[in-house]
Amino acid sequence: MRLSTADTLVISIFFLAMLAIGVWSYFKNKNSTDYFVAGGKMPWWLSGTSHHVSGYSGAVFVAYAGLAYTHGFSVYIWWAFTIGISIIVSARLFPRIWVRLRKKLHIQSPLEYLATRYNLLTQQIMAWSGVLLKLFDVGAKWAAIAILLNVFTGLSVSTGVLISGGISLIYITFGGFWAVILTDFTQFVVQLVGGIVMFVVVLLHMGGISAIWTMWDQLPPGHAKPFNSPYTVWFALAFLCINFLSYNGGTWNLATKYISTKDEVQSARAARVSGILYLIWPLILFFPMWAAPIILPGLENPTESYGLLTLKLLPSGLVGLVLASLFAHTMAMTSSDVNTISAVITRDILPVISRIPRESESRKSLLVARTTTFVFTLLTILVALQYKHFGGVLGLIVTWFGALLGPIAVPMLLGLLPPFKKCGSTAAISAITLGFLAFILTKTVEMSSMALEVGLPLVTSLATYILLGLVRRKKPVPEKVTHFMNLLFEK
């Protein structure tokens, strides 16, 4: 199906707005501090909305739409609900710590403190491992939005990847973190409008507001249940642990949202905004996906359900608005990811392997930052073009991301807390290594459940880190670690 002129116009205006923000943001950047953390001047409402929209992408409307079609309400419980709870319960802890790290250690990358907390080797292992992880994760997002573009326009997935990735590459490279934050907020507004339009149209099609509670009787058995196998209680608990680590900073771009806020109070407010949005907004967002089996029964490919639903129910112009909102979801997350990974490469990796200095106040640092951003984005596009070789979009997002995040995030976040101050570099490296080995095991040996497949690397990493810390419980804490903790928690 070809988009109408009105739809094409709406999408074109959206992309032009993104590019305009990128060009405007170009002039806001004087050095790498501006480019990577907006100079630490971000207000809580911008940081909070950016944290929220950067936490998920258009993949929600492909992979998760497919799960909503086949398994119903359970996708909200193990995904959105666990995220919202994870953020809210720790709003007074990790967001404040990230701000303190920027103020006291002058970090721009979420990994800069690791050389002080552990040692350079630990920092490099985490940096290289995380960059590899994000190659797959961001690549999955490009592939997801390209699949949706294929549904709407008939363009090949490869062409869709090149379009979505190419447009984002331009404004991310130009604008840096200022462009990320400002486009995030614009995309948040577009998402709200597009999501509400779909919600209202589906409600009207289903007979009115009463469909919110009556439609579940028309859906297959189990769709109304909070847990629907294989997405069991254990799977939800595994994802709760993963999301706790991820959304408090284990996913580096989300840590950057807190690092860039003005002060500790504003960082906590930003976290609460994001957490509350996760608890409420997905209930509206997923409603059309839950209703899809009634409106579009018997789909051979459930991952296309949201796109087909849009084409069936919306008139010209509104289709373009919803498609723009789907692009907004993807571009919000990928632009944040790319900007943060560029910071890690520029601040943590390049100074170790080359003569490029870590100095942040020069124009040269800005050129290096933009070059790194450009190159990394190109690599993610190449991965997206090969997404089928990695288990498809759902395989990349749920299995690879969920399984690999834990081994990196465990020493990264727990190392910030005083109870784990005796866990040194050996504990950190061992946790990462054994966690990765557990991941390889889950990919080579058939697991009895998806919860075990996703959770085993995290459990392995967590147990290793804690046990090796206990082994050192009678040994003195290194002076640099004591000084580090005193900086973070001094009264």
Image (cartoon, rainbow, N blue to C red):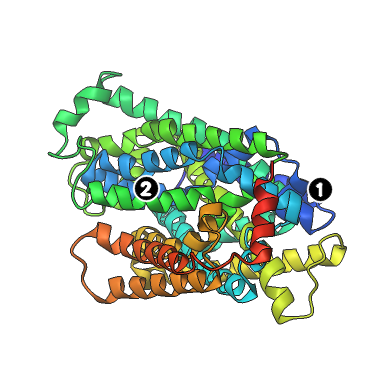
Locate residue 329, reporting x and y percent. 51, 45
Locate residue 285, reporting x and y percent. 40, 35
The residue wearing badge 2 is 240
Locate residue 85, reporting x and y percent. 42, 38
Q: Is residue 304 left or right of residue 27?
A: left
Q: Does the rendering let one see residue 458?
A: yes
Residue 307 vertical placement versus 371 (above, below): above
Between circles 1 and 2, the one closer to the viewer is 2
Secondary structure of the residue carrying numbered label 1: loop
Secondary structure of the residue carrying numbered label 2: helix
Q: Quadrant of residue 425?
A: bottom right
- Residue nearer the viewer, 458 or 364: 458
The residue wearing badge 1 is 28
Q: CA distance from mark 1 to mark 2?
A: 38 Å
The quadrant the C terminus occupies is: top right
Q: Residues within 10 Å of mark 1 (few under 14, many from 20)?
A: some
